[in-house]
Amino acid sequence: MHASPRHARKDEYPGPDAGDGTDAVIQAIARRPWPVQMLEMLEMTPDFVAIMDGDGWLHYLNAAGRRLLGLAQDEEICGLRLEDCHPPKDSARLLNEALPAAHRDGVWHGESTIKTADGRALHVSQIVLAHGKSDGKVTLFSTIAHDITECRHFLDELRRQTTHDALTGLPNRVVLAEHLDMALARAQRGRMLVAVILLDLDNFKRINDSLGHAAGNELLRGVALRLKSCLRADDIIVRYGDDEFTIVVSELHCAENLLPLLQKLRAALAQPLAVAGQEVFAGFSAGIALFPNDGGTPPDMLQNADAALNRAKASGRNQYQFYAPAMNARGQELLALETDLRRALEREEFTLHFQPQLHMCAGRIAGFEALLRWRHPARGLVAPSEFIPLLEETGLIVPVGEWVLRRACEDSRRLRDGAGNPVPVSVNVSARQFGDHRLVDELRRILRDEAMPPEHLELEITESTVMQDAQTAGEILGALDGLGVRLAIDDFGTGYSSLAYLKRFPLTALKIDRVFIQDLPWEDNCAALTEASISLGHRLGLEVIAVGVETGKQMQFLRAHGCDMIQGNFFGRPMPLEEAARFIAGRRHPEASAA
């Protein structure tokens, strides 16, 4: 509520008989022929209009002003001052700035606030005019205040939308750039540290795809609230991308001061969030850059935090990494590698190597796995671990995967022509390629063009790929089975499988991952899991292939437990096509097949 009018004493309020001529000026104006119409106009205007003296005492207040202040139209206004109309800060500004400026220049214009009888604060655009007698001496000031509250609210909302994320309500990159710039400047003056934490939610895409975008949005809002609750008042969290957040932590004395916050952030998401009627866990990976060691400008800090984040995700996710300069050099190397990789297909730099598979009972070659290799014109053979992830990230795995399928069928025909017998070949199908709707049609075309008997081509799909969306995977596997090709589950045992789904899938083979083979026969857990996998595969009617066999003892264990086939360097390393043809020829001799 506004302050009720204060009734002044005769000796402090310059009334009509005060002798200073103030009211005489008003009375003189009123006696002229046109002021009546002017006063009527002032009474009818919806704007706040008042006349005051140099000390802020009101001498006139129009009807709109009276309504705003909760005064009756006939109520006496003597004893009212500016502070009864405006909050203290605004009334002081009007007295100390507006009135002197109007006295000097004749007019002042600005914005202020009027406090109303019902407790509201009206934002107004206000003008103050100075009025004087014939001798030029200023005796009165008039003010007109126009309500711009709605306009201010509109501008504030527009500013908020420009600077804040609509989904989470967090500041956006615009605010981040300004805040980080100021934080670095303060830190430089105070010889302090600033941390930039770039945080990325793990498996957000899987949650978004399985529960829907509305659930994904709900998850992001919940995560934003929890992360924000961990920060100090001077810290800031920004929504940086789809499922990325950036946190700026200022005024750190040393890097160790950041560890409690990292633990707090981790704990905040340790408890599940309720999303779409079910509980969801939201883990995260984080990359951290520290000013001034890891960069002197906001772009440098963000770039280096991103490099650290990539390292964290590459190390297995659900962890954080601090930036190291070596990351930047590695990033530049990968960028150059990616550029060359985009041209490798058209320049025919890819080739296939073939690793033989041994049929344990028959002691003969059961087939070959076709493995992609890249012969870089300057670097020579590039390790698959370096370029295969880049193919996946860039989407090039789809056209390159199609090339692998076609070349594998061509090379299988060449091996068959040289050996005189069919040579089955197996090819890895990536998760991205498996999900491409053109896979079945492209494969049908390749089988026809290359005259490849479909039963001699085996497609290997990882366990994790088929279990991401078992329903859709079942439909794709059914369509591939309809072409007559063999289907194998690769890397078995490294992910989560539903045995009910495995039984329903039209599979022909199961490949036990090398991680279970490498410690055979000494490691009891690996031995037990391998034996169980062989038994399970046979119960499901599948051939079982052990991958990564390196020693004779490993092969003996697998043979003793009924494994159907082995693949690994103990039997044969991956080799170019010509060497594979010679390998087949060498296995025809009895003494060469004693393995």
Image (cartoon, helix red, strand yellow):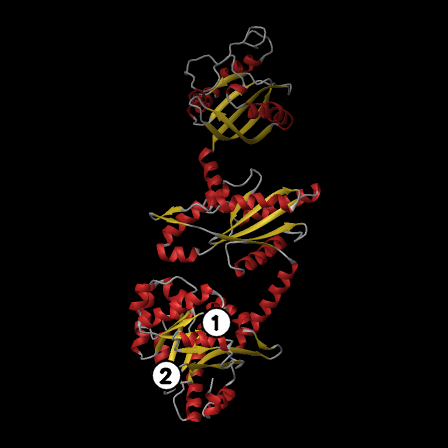
Quarter of the image for the N terminus: give it: top left
Residue 18 vs residue 404: left or right?
Answer: right
Front one among 296 and 231: 231
**Mark 2 or mark 1, whichever is nearer to me:** 2
Q: Amino acid at mark 2?
A: His
The residue at the point 44 percent across, 77 percent down is 566
Indicate whether 151 appears above or below 62: below
Q: Are marks 2 and 1 in contact (CB under 8 Å)?
A: no
Q: Which residue is mark 2?
A: 456
Picture coordinates of residue 18 (x, y %)? 58, 8
Quadrant assignment, res 398:
bottom left
The residue at the point 41 percent across, 75 percent down is 560
Front one among 43 and 31: 43
Q: Which mark is residue 307?
A: none
The residue at the point 60 percent across, 24 percent down is 99
Q: Which residue is mark 1?
A: 396
As helix, strand or loop, the secondary structure at mark 2 comes to helix
> Can residue 169 be seen?
no
> For the residues marked 2 and 1, what is the alpha-carbon distance in whole angstroms?
26 Å
Label 2 environment density (alpha carbons within 10 Å; few <14, some 14–19, many ≥20): some
Picture coordinates of residue 23 (x, y %)? 54, 13
Q: Disc 2 or 1, which lies upstream in sequence?
A: 1
Residue 250 vs residue 158: left or right?
Answer: right
Picture coordinates of residue 32 (x, y %)? 50, 17
Q: Amino acid at mark 1?
A: Leu
The residue at the point 48 percent across, 36 percent down is 152
Indicate whether 280 appears above or below 235: below
As helix, strand or loop, the secondary structure at mark 1 comes to loop
Quadrant assignment, res 382:
bottom right
> Can residue 416 be seen?
yes
Label 1 environment density (alpha carbons within 10 Å; few <14, some 14–19, many ≥20): some
